[in-house]
Image: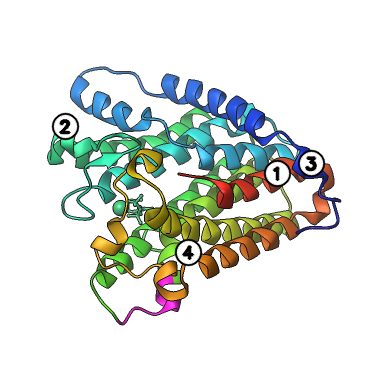
Amino acid sequence: MVATNSQQYLEFDLKRYLAAQQAQVEAALARSIDVVYPEKIYEAMRYSLMAGGKRLRPILCLATCQLIGGTTAMAMSTACALEMIHTMSLIHDDLPAMDNDDFRRGKPTNHKVYGEDIAILAGDGLLAYAFEFIAAQTQDVPADRVLQVIAKLGRAVGAAGLVGGQVVDLECEGRSDVTVDTLTYIHRHKTGALLEAAVVCGAILAGANEGDRQRLSEYAQNIGLAFQIIDDVLDITATQEELGKTAGKDLQAQKATYPSFWGIEESKRQADQLVNEAKANLAAYGESAYPLMALADYITARKN
Ligand code: FPP
Ligand code: MG
């Protein structure tokens, strides 16, 4: 636990903060895509984008931009783009060629509703639109920062990030010789890269210096890994209703997970330790970092 802030941030009303931020993100996402000809593809894109979710990546981006002195308006287009990219990665992850899942965010998966062909294209459409959206819609931010955000996000989603992590994940399925290092590679790329990009992009938009970017990147890497450890735990301990997706899938698919190496209690302890390190990364910012500190706690306390 971070002693520097006398744990005052615990009094920060995260529930209220999350509800307010989520409402702003939902409204911006709802405005982001119009349904025009050919309607089917726009409907498929909106179906998954507007299916709820924690909106953690957009909220991290907005919170970091504010921490560095920027505004919500400066970061909202990137925040929406992060959710578009996250959503497309889940649409593709759920396809029969990958995890073959029927439920996501409490609803039938995209391919179950629109068919595999449209689901692939809905993912492609969201990915391309995310970059267009940042380039065309970001306001009141110098162009060189916008360019840096686009480069950062491109790297985070490609073979050096999400795509690379997903490839190793698929390669490891059903294998009994997966090491903790390989598992950590998977999660640092498949989940961690986009969370880190969310935080660092928020900082870039606000004009953060190199020291801030480095500190915030470390914070994000710590919560990213904690997030995935807890995801693995919840896959075992939570119900389908709580998760909004099929529970127990990892065991069924014989996936290596943190609990399969360490057990549930030790996994939770490791996640807590990472969250504490994440909060320590923020010590220099004082009260301004309360939202990011509370968000780090939320990673381990969440039920879905
Ligand atoms: C869910 O993991 C999946 C991801 C976090 C990302 C998957 C990445 C891709 C499909 C690559 C997408 C392509 C681009 C260009 C970004 P999980 O299966 O462990 O979790 P789940 O139980 O929620 O499905
Ligand atoms: Mg999956």
| Label 2 beta carbon less than 8 Å to ligand 1 | no
258 relative position to 69: left or right: left
Q: CA distance from mark 3 to mark 4?
A: 27 Å
Three-letter code, disc 3: Ser
Of the two numbered discs 2 and 1 on the same chain, state the one appearing first in sequence: 2
Q: Which residues are magenta?
A: 177-183
Q: Secondary structure beneath disc 4?
A: helix
Percent of width and height locating residue 101: 23, 47
Percent of width and height locating residue 98: 21, 55
Residue at 43 percent of width and 68 percent of height: 259
User: Where 110 sits versus 99, above or below?
Assistant: above
Q: CA distance from mark 1 to mark 4?
A: 25 Å
| Crowd class of label 1 (few under 14; some 14 to 19; many from 20; radius 10 Å) | some
Question: Is 182 inside the magenta-drawn segment?
Answer: yes
State the residue position of label 3.
288
Are circles 2 and 1 on residues that touch, CB within 8 Å?
A: no
Residue at 73 percent of width and 54 percent of height: 212
Q: Is residue 161 visible?
A: no
Disc number lying in front (2 or 1): 2
State the residue position of label 2.
114
Q: CA distance from mark 1 to mark 3?
A: 16 Å
Question: In terms of image quadrants, where is residue 167?
Answer: bottom left
250 relative position to 21: left or right: left
Viewer-side residue, 269 vs 103: 269
Disc number lying in front (1 or 4): 4
Three-letter code, disc 2: Tyr
| Crowd class of label 2 (few under 14; some 14 to 19; many from 20; radius 10 Å) | some
Q: Which mark is residue 207?
A: 1
Viewer-side residue, 97 vs 35: 97
Three-letter code, disc 1: Gly
Q: How many marks?
A: 4
State the residue position of label 4.
188
